[in-house]
Amino acid sequence: MIGTALTPGATKVLFCGAGELGREVVIAMQRLGVETIAVDRYPNAPGMQLAHRSHVINMLDGAELRRVIELEKPDFIVPEVEAIATPTLIELEKEGYKVIPTATAAWLTMNREGIRRLAAEKLGLPTSPYQFAETYEEYVEAVKNIGLPCVVKPIMSSSGHGQSTVKTEADIDEAWRISQEGGRAGAGRVIVEGFVDFDYEITQLTVRSISGTIFLEPIGHHQVNGDYQESWQPQEMSLKAKQEARHIAGTITAALGGQGIFGVEIFIKGDKAIFSEVSPRPHDTGMVTMISQNLSEFDLHARAVLGLPIPPIDFYGPSASKAIVVDGNSSSVSFDIKSALAEPQTDVRLFGKGELCGHRRLGVCLARGKDVNEALDKVMRMREKVKVEL
């Protein structure tokens, strides 16, 4: 049973993080009559603009997080970012609160060390070589052991923040600096990963629900310093590679447990699949599903969280997305999207981020085509036509 929002019997969902992905899940939940509460570290975050109520707190502060959750008494707690006091979520889950997909899954996946050790050391999934480092001296030693080139990431970050590639010894100090400034929880532990020789990388969106485990069509994507620029669906790949990718996705999500959507990032080399990362929530590259299928990743997440069945998904055809990334500084951003929307089978979503400070993703262009290349061509043209005024 789903209670009606703002009534004594309401079904309440509290979001820890209210960015553009959380915003879309808020919309999906509200279509089902759910009462939504958005929590983030800054006011007027995208999801806050639509939720029934919002709270601004430091989500790494366990006492503050507990205070808000005990105040709201939600039926479901949905983490949307990495920077959360996950030990507090584990305590709250033991006290009877429902954390999506589980508090342990949130803790493992919000820390690259936890998820990498689970995947490689417990589940035996193929991964890149890796080593963790706490101090600069340990980091330099790890780079030496892993070898060049290698990738350096904070153990807590998302959307490429704090990530860089060490190609030569001259890059070592700068990569350390970036990792210490870009982590969600501030300076700290990093992972040094060996460079994987791969043909392309996919996101295998995987849904765990009362209807079982469902795999969406694989999503290909292009990243710059770990930050997604374009994504497309489906990614062309061999049947064997697709089967291996789904085996990896099914194995890691089963180990994490719970219900919801997971974004499993996988490297593909020929017919081989290599595990990279997993997020227990909608994935930024999965925004392409807002135009590629009848139930987007956000709709699917909402259904899975609420314990609703998921019927066979209607895939509409080859589709693409292009992030609207803007550089500059402004507290008043305006868009002209008329020309971008002139082509058939296209859409634009603006996230409602009111402040721009440096480099930020403010929206996404979406398109379908007769094939992936046509869809990609459309979104590239669309982005050129989107005019942004600061």
Image (tube, rainbow, N blue to C red):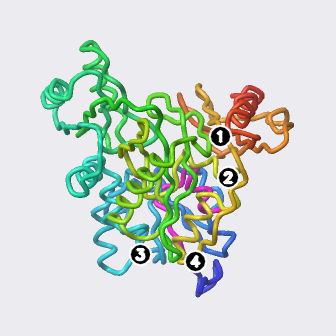
Q: Which residue is mark 4?
A: 308
Of tags 3 and 1, which is closer to the observer? 1
Q: Are marks 4 and 2 in contact (CB under 8 Å)?
A: no
Residue 290: assigned label: 2
Q: Nearer the viewer, residue 261 or 133?
A: 261
Q: What range of the chain is rendered magenta?
A: 11-27
Q: Amino acid at mark 4?
A: Leu
Of tags 2 and 3, which is closer to the observer? 2
Label 4: which secondary element: loop
Q: CA distance from mark 2 to mark 3?
A: 27 Å
* Residue in view at x 42 percent, y 41 percent: 271
Label 2: which secondary element: helix
Label 1: which secondary element: strand
Q: Which residue is mark 3?
A: 98
Residue 355: assigned label: none
From what the image shows, is residue 11 above or below residue 296?
below
The mark nearer the N terminus, 4 or 2, is 2
Q: Amino acid at mark 2?
A: Met
Residue 321: assigned label: 1
Q: Position of residue 198 (x, y in %)?
A: 40, 32
From what the image shows, is residue 48 above or below residue 175?
below
